[in-house]
Image (spheres, coloured by chain):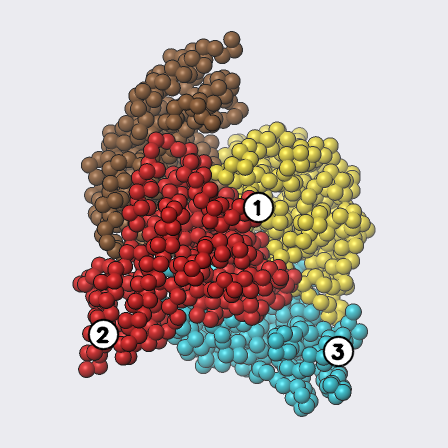
Chain colours: A yellow, B cyan, C red, D brown
Amino acid sequence: MITDSWRGFASDNYAGIHPEILAAMAAANVDHQSAYGDDVVTAQLQEAITEHFGPSARVFPVFNGTGANVVALQAMTERWEAVVCAQSAHIHADEGGAPEKMAGLKLWTVPGVQGKLTPDLIDTQVFDIGFVHRAQPTVVSITQSTEMGTVYSVEELRTLVHHAHVQGLLVHMDGARIANAAARLGVTLRAITTDVGIDALSLGGTKNGAMISEAVVTFSDDLAAKVPFLRKTSMQLSSKMRFISAQLLALLTDDLWRRNAEHANAMADRLAAGVAVIPGVTLTSTVQANAVFAILPAEVTRRLQERFHFYVWNHMTGEVRWMCSWDTTEEDVDYFVAAIAGEMSTAGA
Amino acid sequence: MITDSWRGFASDNYAGIHPEILAAMAAANVDHQSAYGDDVVTAQLQEAITEHFGPSARVFPVFNGTGANVVALQAMTERWEAVVCAQSAHIHADEGGAPEKMAGLKLWTVPGVQGKLTPDLIDTQVFDIGFVHRAQPTVVSITQSTEMGTVYSVEELRTLVHHAHVQGLLVHMDGARIANAAARLGVTLRAITTDVGIDALSLGGTKNGAMISEAVVTFSDDLAAKVPFLRKTSMQLSSKMRFISAQLLALLTDDLWRRNAEHANAMADRLAAGVAVIPGVTLTSTVQANAVFAILPAEVTRRLQERFHFYVWNHMTGEVRWMCSWDTTEEDVDYFVAAIAGEMSTAGA
Amino acid sequence: MITDSWRGFASDNYAGIHPEILAAMAAANVDHQSAYGDDVVTAQLQEAITEHFGPSARVFPVFNGTGANVVALQAMTERWEAVVCAQSAHIHADEGGAPEKMAGLKLWTVPGVQGKLTPDLIDTQVFDIGFVHRAQPTVVSITQSTEMGTVYSVEELRTLVHHAHVQGLLVHMDGARIANAAARLGVTLRAITTDVGIDALSLGGTKNGAMISEAVVTFSDDLAAKVPFLRKTSMQLSSKMRFISAQLLALLTDDLWRRNAEHANAMADRLAAGVAVIPGVTLTSTVQANAVFAILPAEVTRRLQERFHFYVWNHMTGEVRWMCSWDTTEEDVDYFVAAIAGEMSTAGA
Amino acid sequence: MITDSWRGFASDNYAGIHPEILAAMAAANVDHQSAYGDDVVTAQLQEAITEHFGPSARVFPVFNGTGANVVALQAMTERWEAVVCAQSAHIHADEGGAPEKMAGLKLWTVPGVQGKLTPDLIDTQVFDIGFVHRAQPTVVSITQSTEMGTVYSVEELRTLVHHAHVQGLLVHMDGARIANAAARLGVTLRAITTDVGIDALSLGGTKNGAMISEAVVTFSDDLAAKVPFLRKTSMQLSSKMRFISAQLLALLTDDLWRRNAEHANAMADRLAAGVAVIPGVTLTSTVQANAVFAILPAEVTRRLQERFHFYVWNHMTGEVRWMCSWDTTEEDVDYFVAAIAGEMSTAGA
């Protein structure tokens, strides 16, 4: 049993629902609405998506991030095709094999640089085109912000997408934490998706203050025509969809998405700054979103985990991950930093 | 555009969230909770499930009914096995092929009697056991209440499950509307599941006043051990699960599940009684849950659909389906009956 | 242990390899050839296919009929689509669920008339187009000759294919026994495929005297482009393909396919004529290919099965199936007819 | 068009059928036999398998190596489980994604040491056991001899299998070229399978002189009970199975498997010895089976490929693969070595 603060640093989905989002759900709870997305809230969401991503964007709410990824990638591939991604990608490492098991997707993985792909890394997997013995790579999937808490710059994205397109590859973005990326870069959501040529996006809301709210966003008619069928067969079509749409709509209203993400990012910065000066703790990844990765002694980790929720990321190196969320407070951070410092001071003593 | 009442009779998932359920979600929105089901609300839900279904029951919340069905049926089958169900079964007719596409399930269908299976109907599919050329039937899936608005009696269930078990078949119950069945029979949920020997249940909440809330309930250790993995790979694992659990928990509290279902059933009875006396309208299925099926002239249907949402069930016969929900009012029903009578009186004139 | 003739009537794949086919395989066994179909024999086979089916036809040898069907149907469908077929279709009844399990295919089945589909039967499954809740029917699969030993006429095929195409459906032909159909009709292979508008064919060789030899034949560039990848991912790509191609090539040479099929058909006619006059035996399907279906007393079937291999087709009605093959002799048939007559004469005595 | 010798070094499946195997197929072509494996030749094959592998071994002939692998791995895994293998493994690199696409298998890959796994490499993938977010590793798949032409020693196998079993993992061996390994080690087939504890084997015949002949061999009743169904649903069940069985039986008779493999290995040794002394050519992998890997200048490779069939293995390094087969002659090797030497002598000139 965790003995200390209940607002730990395990994950941004340990946090609850932002009040504005809960209020939006309650507001949508009026009278009847057509089921399965043919409702006025989902129509309003489409308008908001158009406003934020441009006229080519079409939104398809789903239940969770894995669902968004698997639906989007099915729409982007023929049955025999494959997806290039980083070894740290959520679709490879953290979805229980859903892409393979539900959609038959072959993933060609590369090591990644702090969670990011590069044109050169993509090229290592683009060979034997037309050769039936090799599952044909036709999609690149990147995560923004990455699973390692880093962020692709606009220029990195533009270069990578252009490189992929030149080779005939589509680009999928896993945007479970896209808000944190846009907030860090100080740009619009459109600037790192539509404007750099992303073909399909998994748009995340749950980790940024929603309850159950993700969506596939497509940027071409071809993909938009396929997603409705794939969403249904992939068990991702919500009957009372208005309540999912209401959550995403609330996030897109009055910049709530950015407010929440900026706050979480700022808390991660504060946490990183706090631990950086503790002797014996090493930060292992650039803090650009709401995650902090660090290596500290196993015994210290063990003692801290008796008081706070957080995960060991790599059991071999002792690397841990600390996530901040929309409701993390400065007091939470300072208290945690002090606890780390305290445990470190007695380590090995 | 529908010109008349916004509380139509299209589906029980056109209705919104019951206030007690929305309140329960808000109440669960306190501080952090471990994600993916390791939270106190889900623990409370398990206690409520144990209370309602007995100590063998284990609950695994998921997103929707299709997800519950596909997860449960995967747990009940080896890769080469098959499921016997009625042609009207939701898993066959209304899930876009999800059981086949996501889980490779072969469905052996039989016509059904007003949506129900019988031992004799099951027997028509149980042959060539051990013969590799035929996908091996090892599960029977029934729906309670059925897609045709009928209800299996306790005795029918006991006989059917016993018959299936004797032949080595497991029995799955699609309980998307199990509350309507138990309410109609005036029995507990346990009486039509645990006590008759059901092996796994898809427990529905969404159609009975919840927002997004279904669950797989297993009744054996063997199945319970498999579902967590299958729920994840099937993209049905919610990160902020406490909010799904809170909805089901609210339904199981103070008999809300029964109150909602009894009301919907009563409204269906009132509707059936009202239209039964309208000349030219024929009721086509026994009204035992919250659905009314009727045949009326195509032109009347067309005119009514300009004013009210509802679906044509069978385009060849002109059969329509009218669903009542937890928020259907007596006024809604009476107004609709009057509208039908009015349109019928001018039919063919 | 079977006590009587080793050339029974169980199946045409109990027979061995026709000498001309075995000789062709031996002749192909010279020196090295590129693997996986890039060999001179497969090139010759393509020429023969062009000659027999016209310039639009492209041949892709595979291992077995199930493989041919599953590869062809994958090429003809998007992931969310479905196939309309008869309940007696091999893809539904006899492939262990391979279409569902390997390719996620949903099959919409209809009863069939002696194994045949009709435009009206197809129409019963073509509804809710564009409606995501129903697996979208986009392919019709027919079997020629059918599993019930009947044959579609050229006119029936033309009408059915035209009807399907008008509705936007592609047509697949399971031609495991297409030779028997063409032989019975006295037409070319092209007359019942290319010329009536079939979109893809599973071309059978094994049941007509080959060892392991089937192929997908496509009639459009679009399908031809997909099959090579799907053949590989479906585990149907033979490394030493020249030996599969040699078998099909032998069948297409000097009309061996027709000679074998005509002989098998003639033996079925002789068998049907022989049993038709035995009191108490009822023929149940029109004999148009190499199969004879009949109902006889269960005890007689049991005694006959102690002496000869054959299958009970329907345990409820007592219907049995007798297959003739390329190597069935007139003596085999006459001996078997006499045996049936003998057993019948003592039945019930 | 290849201008030089038709017996090149591209692959051991460019070779044809060994005369003894073709003769065995012809000998099996007598009269009728029950289809799908219930024949006398397959029964004899089972006896030969028992003799070579011991009483626990059960044989299930299939069409090709991909089929054998995918069937075996399905039998060894639950739907949510995963397989640990080397990045060079055929199941990962060369099967077009069949394991993922047909069986939903997640592959956890590790770099491998000259194509081999080690206990330490396995351990890098065995973590998060019981954690639903990670596809659960429960099988290790190794290739013997490996895709890099190396061979696990008996001791290496014993250690690796023991290590896997202690951790609860089953071990699958891809034995597409197992004969080459046993021949090199001078041991029986049993010594490197049954006796070291292998749980399931893909037994290859095609690359060692057969036409179409592979098999799944299981070493437990549990796996043996599952394979027949999986073989059927995986489209790997041959109707006229006697002819596949006859080929494997011929290989197991009079040590043909060993004679063919020893010859191919000896030719690889001769080739390696020949090129080792050519300045500028670097051998890159230990020659332990019938493959030789070498790096030579790209321009030399290009010129040689105009005369001889062989593959570039790694386009980045210029590594090429030369395979010897049962019918490679000393003259073939010497002629090829001379050609390489000749082209090298003019390289860069």
Do badges 2 and 1 share one subunit? yes
Q: Residue at x 22, y 59 (%)?
A: C6
Find residue A89 and report its horizontal and vertical position in percent: 59, 40
Q: Quadrant of residue D85?
A: top left
How far apart marks 3 and 1 lie (CA) works out to: 47 Å
- Disc sitting over residue C341 in the figure: 2
Disc with the residue nearer the chain's start (2 vs 1): 1
Circle 3 SS class = helix
Does residue D12 appear left or right of residue B330 in this picture? left
Find residue D301 and report its horizontal and vertical position in percent: 48, 20
The image shows residue D336, relative to residue B138, as above or below, that is: above
Circle 1 SS class = helix
How far apart marks 2 and 1 lie (CA) works out to: 54 Å
| Disc 3 target residue | B303
Which residue in the rendered view is the most extreme toward the top?
D349
In this view, the residue in front, C327 or C188, is C188
The image shows residue B319, relative to residue A131, as above or below, that is: below
Q: Residue at x 28, y 71 (%)?
A: C274
Kindly check if marks 2 and 1 are in contact, taking CB atoms under 8 A apart as contact: no
Chain label for disc 3: B
Does residue B118 appear left or right of residue A130 in this picture? left
Chain label for disc 2: C
How far apart marks 2 and 3 lie (CA) works out to: 66 Å
In this view, the residue in front, A221 or D108, is A221
Amino acid type shown at disc 3:
Arg
Q: Residue at x 67, y 34 (%)?
A: A166
Circle 2 SS class = helix
